Image (cartoon, rainbow, N blue to C red):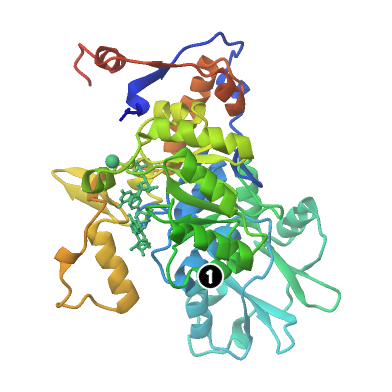
Amino acid sequence: MEFKEGLTFDDVLLVPKYSDITSRSQTDLTTKLSRNISINIPFVSANMDTVTESTMAVVMARAGGIGIIHRFLTIEEQAHEVLKVKRSGSIMIENPYSITSDKSVQDAIDYANDMEISGLLVVDSNSKLIGIITERDLLFADPKLRIEDIMTKDVVTAKFGVSLDESKEILHKHRIEKLPIIDDSGLIKGLITSKDITNNADFPNASKDKKGSPLVGAAVGVKGDFLERSESLLEAGADVLVVDIAHGHSENAMSTIRNIKKAFPNCELIAGNIATAQGAEDLIKAGVDAVKVGVGSGSICITRVITGSGVPQLTAVMDCAKVGKEYGIPIISDGGTRTSGDATKALASGASSVMIGSMLGGTDESPGTVLTKNGKRFKVYRGMASLAASIGRKSKETGLISLDDDLNDYVAEGVEAMVPYKGTVTDILKQLTGGVRSGLSYCGAHTITQMQENAEFIKMSRAGFAESQPHDVSLM
Ligand SMILES: NC(=O)C1=CN([C@@H]2O[C@H](COP(=O)(O)OP(=O)(O)OC[C@H]3O[C@@H](n4cnc5c(N)ncnc54)[C@H](O)[C@@H]3O)[C@@H](O)[C@H]2O)C=CC1
Ligand SMILES: O=c1[nH]c(=O)c2[nH+]cn([C@@H]3O[C@H](COP(=O)(O)O)[C@@H](O)[C@H]3O)c2[nH]1
Ligand SMILES: [K+]
């Protein structure tokens, strides 16, 4: 039997090429996430419960990438996370939350807290706007009063179709922060807020949908509720769904893809994970709009240790990208990215974008709290097939874990770990994108596609690898 060689990031380097680029800003990182979705930087945050919920997804989209909300939540919770992202950045919120005037102040406080918003529109029984209550109205108000008693009745509004500049003028003139948009009969068409206007100006590179809201994706599994979950996620506004299964080159994955595409033909669909050309081709033929590549490459993955299965990540991406190119379907490299150099190599070898977990795991925007150990700060980052994650899932699905459950029955394919606390994702993405921009320049390329055409990899020896690291110095 002949052995094929499998290589990964540390086995190779990109050979420097002549470049006419004089500044990193001359490079363009725009890329395809999937057949019909473009993003402005090639980074996707992983669908893991210690990486991506709405807070992470909002920051990823603002920076120009996208976050995929993990699936280890109830359908309602996951759809709500999607909704939170969608509502975080559009210039006009389409269905602003409202309440009727007969409810109590306490009802309004509870509702605003649940929805994590700072104000509510007040409507009559015909859904016509009759008032507004904001944080300041609710502050110190007697919780037993009716909303009618404390709401502002002469609401400043604008007609549907009002321009951004006109809205700013109205908000400034009246020194207010919320501008309900109504039609001729007084029905609410939307809400423009000062915060959303500021956000829009502050994040010019943000990835947005056609209506100007941040892009967001959400993962679904292959068992049980996936159709119902898909429907709720799409209703909440998810721009793309990701079929997430450890062994994506399986009948399980294939039938899930076919079922989702049949039920929701317009749904943009990514599926994974696979690690071979045949896997990529089969998923593409089943109807996906992008293929996620990576088996056992992740920092917390022990799939290769437990099962003996996997393909070194660079080879996996190269093999799959050849097929992706034939069919015009983008490839996402998932797992094993530790540096901007790894990301550049993944892109140069044919991936259109890179999914990252551990690099984002210890940030302010990842779920979970900061722990302190020996004076250093950490956050938990765990594999979704780790024992702890599985117990978490089971107790979520069925209530508490029963004492009869034999934990030895569960074969973990991931570990639970800690990663150093790293501050905000924004800074990490600046370093990552800066490194990739430089990487493009070393390949003599202005764009990722150009880099893929120009890229020449060279295999290196262990001595070459050692030479590539800082050496013969004491690091500060
Ligand atoms: N990218 C990677 O290398 C890996 C990722 N993971 C992550 O862990 C999480 C849990 O993954 P799953 O166990 O797939 O999800 P899951 O718990 O939803 O299982 C999906 C179905 O696939 C079956 N299944 C699992 N491994 C299989 C295999 N090797 N062959 C045939 N059927 C198999 C399960 O029994 C179940 O019926 C996911 O988020 C996944 O992305 C897990 C292992 C490897
Ligand atoms: O073998 C595995 N067991 C797991 O428990 C597990 N959880 C996540 N993943 C995968 O790892 C990716 C993140 O990898 P990094 O931390 O290297 O960025 C993720 O995006 C996943 O593809 C797992 N793989
Ligand atoms: K690994």
Q: Is residue 347 left or right of residue 156?
A: left
Percent across and percent down for residue 126 are: 74, 87
Q: Is mark 1 within 8 Å of ligand 1?
A: no
Q: Residue at x 35, y 26 (%)?
A: 5
Q: Is residue 54 visible?
A: no
Q: Residue at x 43, y 48 (%)?
A: 273
Q: Position of residue 145 (x, y in %)?
A: 53, 89
Q: Position of residue 54 (x, y in %)?
A: 48, 58
Q: x, y (%) of residue 136?
A: 55, 70
Please name whichever residue, 388 or 141, is drawn nearer the observer in this view of the structure: 388
**Taking the image as drawn, is residue 126 in sight?**
yes
Dividing the picture into quadrants, the one containing residue 93 is bottom right
| Depicted 141 relative to depicted 238: above or below | below
The total number of labels drawn is: 1
Q: Residue furthest front?
A: 1
Please say if 326 is above or below 161: above
Q: Residue furthest top?
A: 18
| Whether residue 146 is situated above or below residue 13 in the rendered picture | below
Q: Characterize the local packing of mark 1: few (<14), some (14-19) or many (20 or more) Cα atoms within 10 angstroms.
A: some
Q: Secondary structure at mark 1?
A: helix
Is residue 292 depicted above or below 7 in this figure? below
Q: Which residue is mark 1?
A: 227
- Which quadrant of the picture is home to ligand 1? bottom left
At 30% from the left edge and 30% from the top edge, which residue is drawn? Answer: 1
Q: Amino acid at mark 1?
A: Leu
Position of the C terminus by quadrant: top left
Q: Nearer the viewer, residue 154 or 225?
A: 225
* Left or right placement of residue 100 versus residue 423 in this view: right
- Nearer to the camera, 325 or 383: 325
